Image (cartoon, rainbow, N blue to C red):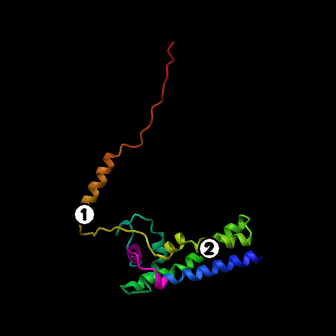
Amino acid sequence: MKGERAAITIALTSAALRLLPLQWLHPLNWDEIEFYRATRWIAEGRVPFRDFWEHHSPLAWFVFAPFSRLSDTPGAAAILGMRWAQIPVWIATFWLANVFMRNAGLTRCARWCAMAIALCSSFLMIAAVEYRKHWFWIDDRDLYSKRALALLMLLFTLADTGAKESLPLITIPAQ
């Protein structure tokens, strides 16, 4: 019981401390700006891979598109707002992880210890604070760039020889 109480205290304290970088201590990342832009485009009705190209799946953009409409600020406030909008998603994620661990037979103390480790980990939490991924976009009127990209894709397709299959090895014993 004492260990469980300590794990709960550590998990909740670290979660509260991890909220500080959301607003004040973590600088904006270029990736966050790009990812926010893609989310905003979804909110404006643009369709990924038709109206703009991005090499990540667009699930998060669709999830956060309604939140991006809450701010018309062209500055950092919009991206900071997207950071705060992720909190319910992270709460749901940890709740589902808790349910999964409970169904797997872990004790309550073990579950809280696992969540405390994740919440105290800078590898997870610094990346989780950022609202980011990458996107690449070519303007619809930029036919030169589109043709260059199409040519590059064609050259890669022609150069692809496929997987090299090894031929069956036949041995003939010699006397």
Residue 57: give x, y in percent of width and height: 45, 65
Q: What residue does disc 2 label?
A: 94
Horizontal side of 110 relative to 118 (left or right) equals: right
Of 84 and 156, nearer the camera is 84
Left or right: 174 as drawn, with respect to 16: left
Q: Amino acid at mark 1?
A: Ser
Kind of residue sitting beneath label 2: Phe
Q: Position of residue 96 (x, y in %)?
A: 63, 71
In the image, is residue 50 part of the stretch drawn in magenta? Answer: no
Q: Quadrant of residue 114?
A: bottom right
Give the residue at the far top of this rendering: 175
Determine the residue positioned at 40% across, 68% down: 134
Q: Position of residue 33 (x, y in %)?
A: 38, 76
Choose between 105 and 129: the one closer to the eye.
129
* Residue 2 figure quarter: bottom right
Above or below, 120 relative to 167: below
Range covered by the magenta-colored residues:
22-42
**Residue 34 painted magenta:** yes
Q: Secondary structure at mark 2?
A: helix
Could you tell me what secondary structure mostly forms the magenta stretch?
A: helix
Secondary structure of the residue carrying numbered label 1: helix
Which quadrant holds the N terminus? bottom right
Give how far across and how far down residue 77 sits, in percent: 41, 86
Circle number at residue 145: 1
Circles 2 and 1: CB atoms closer than 8 Å: no
